Image (spheres, helix red, strand yellow):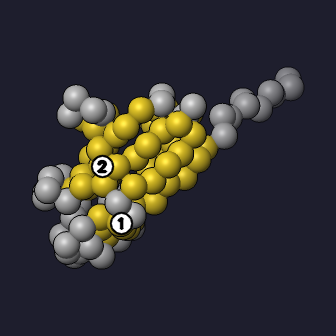
């Protein structure tokens, strides 16, 4: 039997770093399509980042699972503005701009 490899869509990686006072960078731009959202936690207490649409509806949670400082999740996003915030401290925010 011949096995065919599934063709995987290209992934654009965006990384947000959580500190005690803020999330950096404050704004990231990416192209529409499959996005890998990565988090690095240097705050010592953040457990996950939330990516929400303009209406505030949560779309994906990026959790630290295998590594104590890092997490990663993938999501397919359409053009628009998305909020990224610390689940424990929603006042720590960043913006993810998805362009066509």
Viewport quadrant of the C terminus: top right
Q: Using the image as rendered, state which of residue 20 and residue 29 is in the foreground.
A: 29
In this image, 90 relative to 19: left or right?
left
Q: Which residue is mark 2?
A: 84
Q: Tell me the CA gap for discs 2 and 1.
A: 10 Å
Counting other residues with Cα less than 10 Å from the Cα at mark 1, is it few (<14), some (14-19), or many (20 or more)?
Answer: some
Counting other residues with Cα less than 10 Å from the Cα at mark 2, is it few (<14), some (14-19), or many (20 or more)?
Answer: many
Work out whether residue 83 can be spotted.
yes
In the picture shown, does residue 39 fall above or below 37? Answer: below
In the picture shown, does residue 44 fall above or below 17? Answer: below
Q: Which residue is mark 1?
A: 24
Work out whether residue 34 can be spotted.
no
Q: Residue at x 54, y 52 (%)?
A: 13
Q: Residue at x 43, y 43 (%)?
A: 97
In this image, 49 relative to 91: left or right?
right
Q: Residue at x 80, y 27 (%)?
A: 4
């Amino acid at each position: 039997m011949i096995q065919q490899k599934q063709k995987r869509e290209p992934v654009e990686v965006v990384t947000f770093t959580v500190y005690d006072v803020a999330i950096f960078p404050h704004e990231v731009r990416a192209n529409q399509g499959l996005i890998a959202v990565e988090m690095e936690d240097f705050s010592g207490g953040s457990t996950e980042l939330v990516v929400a649409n303009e209406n505030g509806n949560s779309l994906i949670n990026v959790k630290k699972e295998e590594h104590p400082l890092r997490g990663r999740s993938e999501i397919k996003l359409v053009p628009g503005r998305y909020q990224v915030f610390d689940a424990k401290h929603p006042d720590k925010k960043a913006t993810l701009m998805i362009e066509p």
